[in-house]
Image (spheres, grey):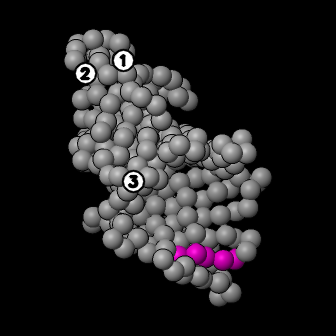
Amino acid sequence: MFAAALVIAWCPAMAFAQNGGASLDSVLASMDKAAQQFRSAEADFKWDQFQSAVAEHDVQSGQIFFQRSNGRLEMMAHVTDPKNAEKYALYDGSTVRLFDAAANHVTEYATGKNKETFETFLVLGFGGSGQDLKKSFDVSMEAMEPVGGVNAARLLLVPKSQKVRNVFDKIYLWINPANGICVRQKLMEPQTGNYRDAFYTNIQLNKSLPKNAFKLPTNSKTQVVHPQG
């Protein structure tokens, strides 16, 4: 899913007042509470992938589902925007499967040693705790600002790992302080000016999900590819 943070941690009282009643500690605490209670989430999304070199926006929309059960995390994103080809992205706890419905083609990637890092990005603001966030990122709070009718806390995350910073050097999260859940993410690539901006609406927490939420609509003719490397 960024810019230099406004650092006012030297005066917590001022930070509380200027941020409209929320502080970094209170926002992270709300994320901790959400993580303890988190079982599932469902939301509509709009993803805007911006390529700076050609000044081009690739906008996709659809639905996303998360589920955590017995320590296992699952995620399914379903691109349903009629302007784009129908696509799915499924994570089952160890493998990522990308399904292009029109081509009837699945590409599978094993997360392997990168599982922990992958899941850290996957649950940014959706069931990830504030304390876990601090383990992987230097976190600061910039401001409160409206996102889709929510007065959200904008957090700046700088990855502690150089390997991660080579992919995304700054990440913004907009967290709803009332429930500790993300309403927007912006991931910035280093030096290129490229970014992915994601907006989440109609968020439903800990409710029953559709039976096929984590099932790809493949068939006997679906081609499956396992890229090397």
- In this view, the residue in front, 78 or 162, is 162
Residue at the location (77% across, 52% down)?
A: 83
Question: Of the numbered discs in the image, which one, if any, rests on residue 164?
Answer: 3
Secondary structure state at the residue bearing disc 3: helix
Q: Is residue 121 magenta?
A: no
**Magenta segment boundaries in residue numbering:** 104-108
Task: Please state which of the two labelled residues, at mark 3 or mark 1, is closer to the viewer.
Answer: 3
From the image, tell me which residue sits under label 1. 19
Q: Residue 191, how many percent across, how many down?
A: 53, 43
Look at the picture and state if 94 lies above or below 141: below
2 or 3: tag closer to the N-terminus: 2
Main secondary structure of the magenta stretch = strand
Instruction: Give the spatial CA distance, label 3 vs label 1.
Output: 29 Å
Q: Residue 82, how many percent across, how many down?
A: 76, 54
- Residue 1 showing in the rendered view: no
Mark 1 packing: few (<14 Cα in 10 Å), some, or many (20+)?
some
Q: Is residue 107 magenta?
A: yes
Instruction: Give the spatial CA distance, label 1 vs label 2.
Output: 12 Å
Q: Residue 170, how many percent across, how many down?
A: 43, 40
Residue at the location (74% across, 71% down)?
A: 102
Task: Please state which of the two labelled residues, at mark 2 or mark 3, is closer to the viewer.
Answer: 3
Task: Please state which of the two labelled residues, at mark 1 or mark 2, is closer to the viewer.
Answer: 2
Q: Residue 148, how many percent across, how many down?
A: 55, 30
The amino acid marked with disc number 2 is Ala
